[in-house]
Structures are given as C-alpha cells and as structure tokens.
Image (cartoon, rainbow, N blue to C red):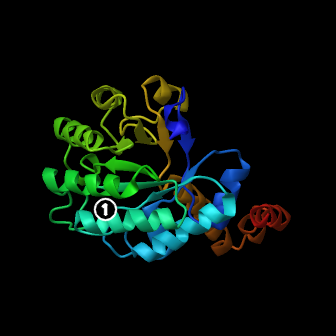
Amino acid sequence: MALHTRDGGFVMPNAWDGLSALMLADAGFEAIATSSAALAAMLGRPDGRHEVTRSEHLEHAGLLARLTGLPVNGDFEDGYGDTPEDVAATVEAAVEFGLAGIGVEDTSGDPDQPIRDFDEAVHRVRGAVDAAKGRIAVTGRTDNFIQGRPDLDDTIRRLTAFAEVGADVVFAPFPPDLDALEAIVTAVAPTPVNVLVSPSDKVLTVAELQKAGVKRISLGPFLYANAMAALEQATKALVAGDLAAATTGLGFDRIGELIARGKN
C-alpha cells in the first residue's frame, strides 16, 4: 500500500503475457496488473461473462508475479463467485498465489442486469476485506459508467460504502469528466482512487490525474490493444505482399535478454 499513499501515487500498467510483464518491469514500473479483458481476448473469449475461470486467472497472475518479482494486482472481475464466501475464497487463493492486490467488481456477468444491487455489492467487498486480513490490497470497483448507468451519485455511494467496509482502493472506470473524477476523489478521501486511463471525455496526462488526487493509474486492456493494432498493421502489410513491413519488430536478441532477466 505504500505506493498508494506516497505523494503522486503511481502508474500500474496491465500485462497480458510473460514477455509484456518483463518489458514493463524492465521499463522501471514498480507494480503491474493483469487485465481480465486482455486475458479473455488472448484466450478467444468474451470478457465479463464468467468464461475465464478463477484457476486460469490465478495461474496467469502468478506467472507474471514469478517472472517479474513485482507486486501484481489481479483484475479478478466480480471475484469469481456469487456470494461473499465465494469472493473470500478467491481472495484466499490470490494470497496463496503471491498476488499483492485484487479487484472485486459489482458486476454480475448477466447482460440483462449487469450491476449487482447495492447491498449485495457491499457485502461482497466486505467478504473480500475480511478474507484479506491485510495480506493483500483489496480494490472495490463499480462498473456503473461502463454498464450504461451514468449515475454519479450512486457511483459515489457505492465507492464510499466499499471504503467504509475496508476496501484499500476504490475504482469506477471512466467517469464522464474531470469534475466527476474530482468529486469521487473528494467523497472517498483518504481512500486511494484508481483511474483507468482517464475520464471518458478526454485523455489526460499522468501529471493532470495526479493533480486531481488520483493515486493509481491503470491501463486495463489498452496496452494489449496497442500491440494488437501493430499486429493488424503487420497483417495488412503481409496481405499486400510487403514482407519487410510485416516482419519489422522487436528483435529476438532483445526478447531473449528480457526472458533471461525473468529467469534470474
């Protein structure tokens, strides 16, 4: 938690495989996270629909932690279970796999009712906190804004409740603008706030987010999407017969260097 409470906070990029985790570690980042969306896409499955199992995500997150030696935060969707007891079991497993943090959303995996009722959401975060016993940082997250519920008051109510039951960090992806983000930061203070890239209306700089009081900035699936955009461009070059453009990329010497560092 020291990274969350120091002046300025920190940037926590999300890796999706061993090499991406090693590249982020080599670049000097002090902590990394998984991305449920990137992991699901890597497996050819939709995100947020309970199609990636808890054990798959744990093995994935554990690999990133072992390779890098960095604190790893698990983006564990709804905690992989309907009940607070299920969520607690996921937290216990995350501790056993050596993770430093875990996120628990108020999502349900049901497209017809994607956000859980307030009381249920709070009970599930409390279950995570009780299981954590200070051994792992718990992030309480509401997905109101990305699930078609642009209700700032309810978002603040949920995040405040998560903080009150002991969540170490709170998180609501893509508030509509900077004013909404600052309202969240003020309402839950002194609990640290995570932001996914920026508010939805404008991509800000790290310095601007820190000035607004944000303590942790995550990237979610966006680095993965950036890499896939490069792959798509290479694919188009290949279709056009341009082998040179299609095969320009990171050298195998560099890849080998990174992997060797991970083994050491």
What percent of the width, then of the height, locates residue 72? Answer: 55, 55
As displayed, is residue 149 above or below residue 81?
Answer: above
Q: Is residue 252 found left or right of 124 in the rendered image?
A: right
Q: Is residue 69 found left or right of 179 in the rendered image?
A: right
In the rendered image, which quarter is residue 90 located in?
bottom left
Q: Is residue 156 found left or right of 53 in the rendered image?
A: left
Amino acid found under the numbered disc labelled 1:
Asp
Q: Nearer the viewer, residue 228 or 222?
A: 222
Q: Residue at x 22, y 66 (%)?
A: 83
What percent of the width, then of the height, locates residue 56? Answer: 47, 76
**Quarter occupied by the C terminus:** bottom right
Q: Nearer the viewer, residue 19 or 86?
A: 86
Q: Residue at x 32, y 54 (%)?
A: 130
In the rendered image, which quarter is residue 161 located in?
top left
The residue identified by callout 1 is 78
Crowd rating for badge 1 (residues with CA inside 10 Å; few <14, some 14–19, many 20+): many
Name the residue furthest right. Answer: 253
Name the residue furthest front. Answer: 133
